[in-house]
Amino acid sequence: MLIKRIHGWEMPESRATPEALFLNRRAVIAAGIGAASIAAGAGPASAQWFQSSAPDLTRRPDPTDDLYPAKRNESFTLDRPLTDEVISAGYNNYYEFGTSKNVWKQAEAKKTRPWTIKVDGLVEKPFEIGIDDLIRRTQLEERLYRFRCVEAWAMAVPWTGFTLKSFLDIAKPTSGAKYLRFETFQNPAVAPGQKQSWYPWPYVEAVTIEEATNDLPLMVTGVYGKPLRNQFGAPLRLILPWKYGFKSIKAITRVSFTADRPKSFWEQLQASEYGFWANVNPAVPHPRWSQATEQVLGTQERVPTLIYNGYGEQVAHLYKGKEAERLYL
Ligand code: MTE
């Protein structure tokens, strides 16, 4: 029998069975119902645990406060209610700050101003731009998107940002540019996860130029009508709603335009499980778990997963003629 050894850095199979009950309890508590009314549980499922770990949602001053809330783009609608902010802000994947989902407090250690984004590689002229200059050169809008993690949990979130397409007008790639490579900050002094040398830091992700010129990819600067908080990837992250969540890189410091396909963080770690394309497809299981259904965070519901996470109409054409490639993980 073939036994798969699970390395410390792999997304464990247990994560593919999300803590629905636990999250539901959290929603109940967030709604103001006393801990005493909740059936007592042990460990991380207990009300006591949540009360000491609930994310701080207090609004902090931000240089772009005047831009929020941005006008909602009504063309993006949802098939489910929005995920409660207290849930999505307290259940994150941000390996720079640890492998637990409860990293919001650790992530607060990261300063997000000043913050510069380097744009280089195959562009007319490489440059650096401060985050606030960049935000003010673009048009912010709010979009309601479904979000599907490869671990088989899902949420629905009101992101605010500018389109990646509009960023290309600022970056001015040359005709040789075929891919965009995104890189996250590197600072083990504030991000203890980066001291774990078996990870190929910094976190890197990439898309093709055709994917980037599609209308869906959003360079996200805010969520729930406010500037992004650190655990969501402040001050700038990518959101690619038709791909598994690991493609949606947080805390971007560099965008490079390349002729060759970059290797992403997860692909470097385990290419057999996390490929370049990583488009959502319920019919293609992860090598260690099914992708047929997803747990809706904050509910007890498990719903069928949709091809391209429901965004096939907008993106399926991007993959015509590429069927021989491993498009779905
Ligand atoms: N970006 C960085 N820099 N570091 C990370 O660990 N995790 C990814 C992605 N972007 C990650 C990242 C994964 S696995 C997921 S599912 C999403 O962020 C989670 O986004 P959320 O915490 O806002 O839900």
Image: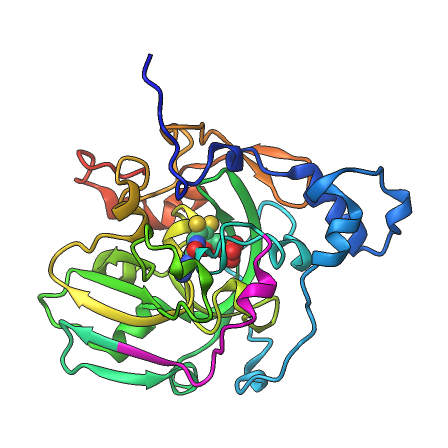
Q: Identify the image quadrant of residue 213.
A: bottom left
Name the residue: 67% across, 76% down: 59
Q: Nearer the viewer, residue 279 or 78?
A: 279
Q: How many marks?
A: 0
Q: Which residues are magenta?
A: 102-118
Q: Identify the image quadrant of residue 138.
A: bottom left
Quarter of the image where the N terminus is located:
top left
Residue 284 appears in the picture as rendered: no
Task: Please give left or right for residue 229 compared with residue 315 in the image.
Answer: right
Q: Identify the image quadrant of residue 3.
A: top left
- Colouring of the image: rainbow
Name the residue: 46% across, 74% down: 235
Quarter of the image where the C terminus is located:
top left
Q: Nearer the viewer, residue 225 or 191?
A: 191
Task: Please give left or right for residue 113 compared with residue 127 in the image.
Answer: right
Residue 79, given in percent of the width and then of the height, sits at 58, 45
Residue 29, given in percent of the width and then of the height, sits at 80, 52
Name the residue: 62% across, 45% down: 297
Residue 31, given in percent of the width and then of the height, sits at 81, 55
Residue 10 appears in the picture as rendered: yes
Name the residue furthest top: 1
Name the residue furthest left: 176
Task: Please give left or right for residue 46 compared with residue 242 in the image.
Answer: right
* Residue 107 among magenta residues: yes
Task: Find ligand 1 in the image and state its quadrant.
Answer: bottom left
* Residue 65 among magenta residues: no
Residue 125, given in percent of the width and then of the height, sits at 15, 83
Task: Please give left or right for residue 324 compared with residue 246 in the image.
Answer: left
Name the residue: 60% across, 41% down: 296
